[in-house]
Image (cartoon, rainbow, N blue to C red):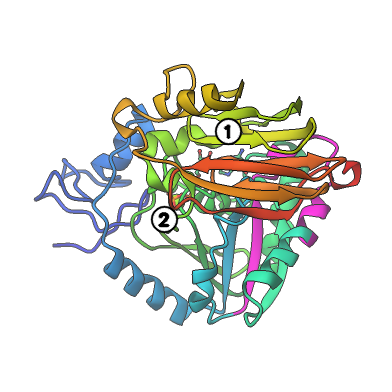
Amino acid sequence: MSDKKCPGCGVVLQTEAPDQPGFYQSPEKTGTVYCQRCFRLRHYGQFKRAAGGETVLDREIQSALRKSDLILLVTDLFDPEGSMPVAWSRLFTLPVLVVVNKADLLPERTPWAEMAAWFQALWARRFPGAELLGVKVVSARQGGPERLARFNALKKELAGKKVTVLGAANVGKTSLLTSLLATEDQKRAELPTVSRFPGTTLGISTWTLSSSGLILYDTPGFLPGGRMGDRFAPETASRLLPEKKLQVKLWNIQPDGAVLVGGLAGIWNQSPAARTLVFFAGEKTPIHQSRGQKAEALLTEGPDWLRVYGQEERPERFAEQFFTVQPGEDLYISGCGWVAVKREAARIRLLVPPGVEVGTRPSLVGRREG
Ligand SMILES: Nc1nc2c(ncn2[C@@H]2O[C@H](COP(=O)(O)OP(=O)(O)OP(=O)(O)O)[C@@H](O)[C@H]2O)c(=O)[nH]1
Ligand SMILES: [Mg+2]
């Protein structure tokens, strides 16, 4: 068997087992060969979840880390906590450059630079012992001349280094790598596969940017488990993520008023008076106002117009938690969105499927209006 890898997903190509990763059909084919799974994903948007090989993955990642000078940790602006889980401190055996991706999702007037300080503070809270080289805010989706300038600057900063690109699934590691490759003059016949589904990249692939002597190892994303999408099928996970913009709704919620998010989260105002709350979610996630018991019944029932999950994925139960959220703070629901509280502190009752990470934090956007 050859050890040639699929340039799309990084697994070793093979012609024997059609249901295993790396399978391709035309052994006589020369030039660029993608595996069948990448071919179908690239051409028809059809995604097949690959059986997990976590131990192999861990071993491969450790071997990439041993060859590297630094880690480029890709994080998702939409889900800072979900893309920086505390358990990852064991991986940070090298200096880490944090790249905050998907900055294009920010509301127009929000300066990108604010995000760097915000993520740096989150890093300090989560990984106090690890070495942080800096925080860069980028968008692999951004167009125009600014994009090239940003990625050229990043490339320059990494010049001559060997870098492992790490992060949670779907944060845009491969998109970022592709953006760096696009700064090179020479056009490549082979490019890695990017998709809206978590679990696209399956093995480690090595990419060299010869103009700057930069070597990048792209890696498969981890499923941290605390993100809402990690608990559902890839289609549902993908539907929860904003693609082009954040959905933002500012509402005055009466006492016992509730807001339901995608049939997956219920947020009740349990303060003695109305509260101004701002809801942030992906643009495909329905956000619906309701009240008291009726809201709870709707959440459990999950009618078609409310739910983002598939019929067979209905959560068996929801866990109840209570929070007092101060003005200038968010209540975040990892991988699903967040609620910002304005003017007065709000007492909130929250229902989400068990295991989803939730908590309060300094507001991510619009702090000065708080
Ligand atoms: N809005 C927005 N979407 C992005 C950006 N970068 C990547 N995406 C989208 O995020 C999704 C995941 O991108 P990938 O590059 O495949 O993510 P990954 O981290 O390599 O994912 P795995 O290989 O599954 O670990 C795709 O739908 C991308 O188009 C960005 O800067 N902005
Ligand atoms: Mg990838």
Residue to which mark 2 is pinned: 223
Measured as percent of width and height from the top left, residue 237 is found at 44, 39
Residue at the farthest right position: 368
Image quarter of residue 160: bottom right
Q: Secondary structure at mark 2?
A: loop
Badge 2 residue CB within 8 Å of ligand 1: no
Q: Nearer the viewer, mark 1 or mark 2?
A: 2
Asked if residue 324 shows in the view, the reply is yes
| Label ID, residue 243 | 1
Residue at the farthest left position: 16
Residues at discs 1 and 2 in contact (Cβ within 8 Å): no
Question: Would residue 255 be counted in the magenta stretch?
Answer: no
The amino acid type of the residue labelled 1 equals Glu
Image quarter of residue 341: top right
Count the numbered circles shown. Answer: 2
- Crowd class of label 1 (few under 14; some 14 to 19; many from 20; radius 10 Å): some
Quadrant assignment for the N terminus = bottom left
Measured as percent of width and height from the top left, residue 158 is found at 65, 69
The amino acid type of the residue labelled 2 equals Leu
Viewed as shown, does residue 369 lie left or right of 100? right
Q: Nearer the viewer, residue 370 or 116?
A: 370
Picture residue at 74% right of the left edge, 41% below the top: 340
Bounds of the magenta segment: 95-117
Q: Nearer the viewer, residue 90 or 304?
A: 304
| Label ID, residue 100 | none
Viewed as shown, does residue 286 lie left or right of 318? right
Measured as percent of width and height from the top left, residue 58 is found at 35, 71
